[in-house]
Structures are given as C-alpha cells and as structure tokens.
Image (spheres, helix red, strand yellow):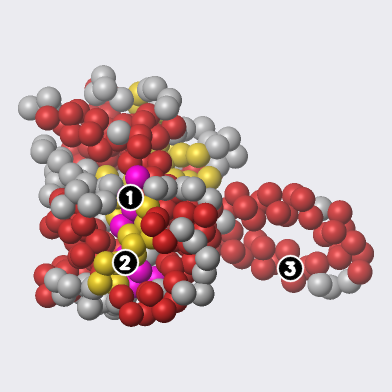
C-alpha cells in the first residue's frame, strides 16, 4: 500500500514524520511512503538516513497549515499545503491512504472537501482505537460533531460496527451507548431517543448503555457518543494515564526501598506504559468519508508516525471503506 504522509503536520515537523517514514519502510509496514511538503527540507533530512530510495518519494508542497489556523479557511486558501496535496494524491489514485499529525479540524475539513461523504451518511466522525483490560475498543465520535441527533449516533454505531468487524475480523461486535446510567430511561432526550433507535436496528449488536467507569474494562467493542463528550473522555483518560506515571515516579524517588520495589516491578510498569501509550496506536480514523484519512496526535514522535503508517496500511487492506460504501448505498 502507498501511504501519503503530510510531512509538515506535527508540532515538530518534519522530523518525526521523516524518521517515522524511514522506520516504516525498514520494518516493511507498507509498500511506499510519499512524503508531502517542502522538497528541499525533506530531501536534506532524508540524507541523514539509510533506506531503500525506491520506497520513499517526495512530493513538493510550498505551504503548511498551522495548528492555530482556521480549519475550513486554511484548507480553502492554502491549496498547495502539504495536507491538501496529500489528500489530492489519494483522489488521483496515487496513494491508498493519507496520514497527518496536523490540525485535526483541518484534516477533517480537507478530507471532507476532497473525498466527500459516503452516500446517505449524514456526518463523518473521528473513531479512536482505545486500550482496555481485555483488548481494544472503538470510541466515536471523538470531536468532529459537538452537537448530534439520535440519527447521527445510530450512524456512528453502524460505522463503528463495520470498522471493528473489518479491522479486527470479528463479526457482530458489541455496541454500547455512553450514558449516565445503564437503564434505558437514563440520559437526556437525545440519548434516550438514540437508545430506542439502536435497540431497534437489526444490523448492529446493541447491548445497551455503558457508564464512564466501564470504558476501559473491555466489556464492549464499540462505544458511541457525541463529539463533545467523546473529546472530553479521550483527553481525560490521556491526562489520568500521564498523572498515574508521574505520581509513581514521585513516590519511587522518595527512598531506596521504593526504588528496589520499582526495579522488581519494572516489567509490570513497562506493560502498563505500553498499553496506555498513544504512540502504540498511531492515529484515529475519519469514518463516513469516501476516502481514507488517519489523524495522529500533534505531539507524535517518530514511533507514533511509524505506527500511524502501519495502521493506515492495515485499514486500507481491510476493505472497510468499500464495505461502508456498499452498506450505505443499500439504505434508503
């Protein structure tokens, strides 16, 4: 698979993107990486590495969309930005997926304008792979749609179900609605209505409401919520994970007994850190679009970019986009 990588997206671009691309081809995670951005800068930085030059190509783009730029305005005015050019490569069938660690709103706007929505999909969403005690689950929407209708939440459940099914090769994944209680009567008017729609839909395996305390227990496969709630959940969990390790580090440094205990428990800490590390998962998939875009964290390092390329390659091979199109074309 050919992955178009926005080389000027992340906070520290283009260095994590370039190193991540080199690591990806060395580990044979995709067929080719296309680095999009200032050709002179990218070529100069690539000269520091040893790699197969046939598997990394450079496409020049003279502009860059900054993190503070207006999402839709920057996409419309900066036509020669690395992000917009990467999306163009997909539309020209020169790439099989796009990866960017840039402005999330701009990635969504460029992808929406470039690909368009799948027929009959009301709104695209951001779907995040989340670590749990039992494995992985998908949460959506993680910030693309602050205000949602019950119909939007139903479509997120359908898209999440298809995504999980084709990515993890597991039929009839369990779908849950994030709410303030497990009972069907709990929640606001939107979640109550959404519960009824989800429960009545035979295409999905809806198992009911889920509370926030159960998100990382692994009791479900797909969790549905609006983008306002989803974004808060995502950033809260990220913050909690970071704080846990900071507290542990503080306590370990207090005396030699704690340091000795930490040494004995090192394999456990290593496992926990890897399981909660966002760099292990690479990025989030934009679902409901006629194309394939993966958005990574702005603070992504080379490891995160490498894993985002791996993730994009796997999604492209899964057939998710084609099956999502087929599914919604038969819905009146």
Q: What crowding class fits label 2: few (fewer than 14 Cα within 10 Å), some (14-19), or many (20 or more)?
A: some
Does residue 99 belong to the magenta stretch?
no
Residue at 26%, 22% in the rendered image: 203
| Residue 6: x %, y % from top left | 32, 65
Determine whether the residue tagged by mark 1 lies in a helix, strand or loop: strand
What residue lies at 91% left-to-right and 69% top-to-bottom?
256
Q: Quadrant of the C terminus?
A: top left
Magenta residue span: 1-12
* Residue 99 appears left or right of 277: left
Task: Give the image location of residue 158, x and y in percent.
Answer: 27, 33
**Is the residue under label 1 in contact with that under label 3 (CB below 8 Å)?**
no
Q: Earlier in the sequence, mark 3 or mark 1?
A: 1
Residue picked out by circle 2: 58
- Distance, label 3 to label 2, CA atoms, is 42 Å
Residue name at image x 21 percent, y 65 percent: 85
Looking at the image, residue 106 sits to the left or right of residue 43; the answer is left
The disc at residue 319 is: none
Q: Nearer the viewer, mark 3 or mark 2?
A: 2
Mark 3 vs mark 1: in front: 1
Which is more N-terminal, label 2 or label 1?
Answer: 1
Residue 5 lies in the magenta-colored region: yes
Which residue occupies the foreground of this view, 115 or 241?
115
Of mark 3 and mark 2, the one earlier in the sequence is 2
Location of residue 231 (image quadrant): bottom left
Residue denoted by label 1:
2
> For the residue labelled by badge 3, is the local secondary structure a helix, a strand or a loop?
helix
* Distance between mark 1 and mark 2 Cα atoms: 12 Å
Residue behind mark 3: 249
Q: Tell me: 165 left or right of 262.
A: left
Q: Quadrant of the N terminus?
A: top left
Farthest residue to the left: give it. 332
């Amino acid at each position: 698979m050919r992955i178009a990588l926005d080389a000027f997206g992340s906070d520290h671009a283009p260095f994590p993107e370039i190193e991540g691309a080199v690591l990806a081809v060395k580990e044979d995670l995709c067929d080719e990486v296309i680095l999009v951005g200032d050709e002179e800068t990218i070529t100069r930085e690539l000269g520091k590495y040893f790699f197969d030059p046939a598997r990394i190509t450079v496409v020049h783009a003279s502009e860059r969309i900054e993190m503070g730029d207006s999402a839709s305005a920057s996409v419309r005015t900066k036509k020669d930005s690395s992000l917009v050019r990467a999306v163009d490569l997909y539309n020209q069938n020169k790439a099989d997926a796009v990866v960017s660690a840039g402005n999330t709103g701009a990635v969504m706007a460029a992808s929406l304008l470039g690909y368009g929505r799948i027929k009959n999909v009301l709104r695209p969403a951001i779907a995040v792979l989340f670590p749990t005690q039992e494995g992985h689950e998908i949460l959506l929407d993680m910030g693309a749609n602050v205000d949602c209708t019950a119909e939007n939440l139903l479509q997120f459940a359908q898209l999440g179900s298809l995504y999980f099914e084709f990515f993890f090769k597991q039929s009839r994944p369990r779908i849950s609605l994030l709410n303030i209680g497990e009972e069907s009567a709990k929640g606001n008017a939107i979640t109550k209505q959404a519960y009824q729609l989800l429960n009545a839909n035979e295409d999905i395996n809806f198992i009911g409401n889920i509370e926030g305390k159960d998100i990382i227990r692994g009791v479900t496969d797909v969790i549905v919520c609006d983008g306002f709630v989803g974004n808060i959940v995502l950033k809260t969990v990220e913050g909690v994970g970071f704080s846990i390790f900071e507290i542990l580090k503080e306590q370990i440094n207090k005396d030699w007994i704690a340091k000795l205990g930490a040494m004995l428990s090192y394999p456990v800490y290593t496992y926990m850190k890897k399981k909660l590390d966002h760099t292990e998962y690479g990025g989030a998939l934009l679902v409901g679009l006629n194309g394939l875009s993966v958005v990574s964290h702005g603070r992504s390092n080379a490891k995160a970019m490498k894993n985002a390329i791996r993730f994009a390659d796997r999604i492209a091979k899964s057939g998710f986009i084609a099956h999502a199109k087929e599914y919604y074309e038969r819905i009146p």
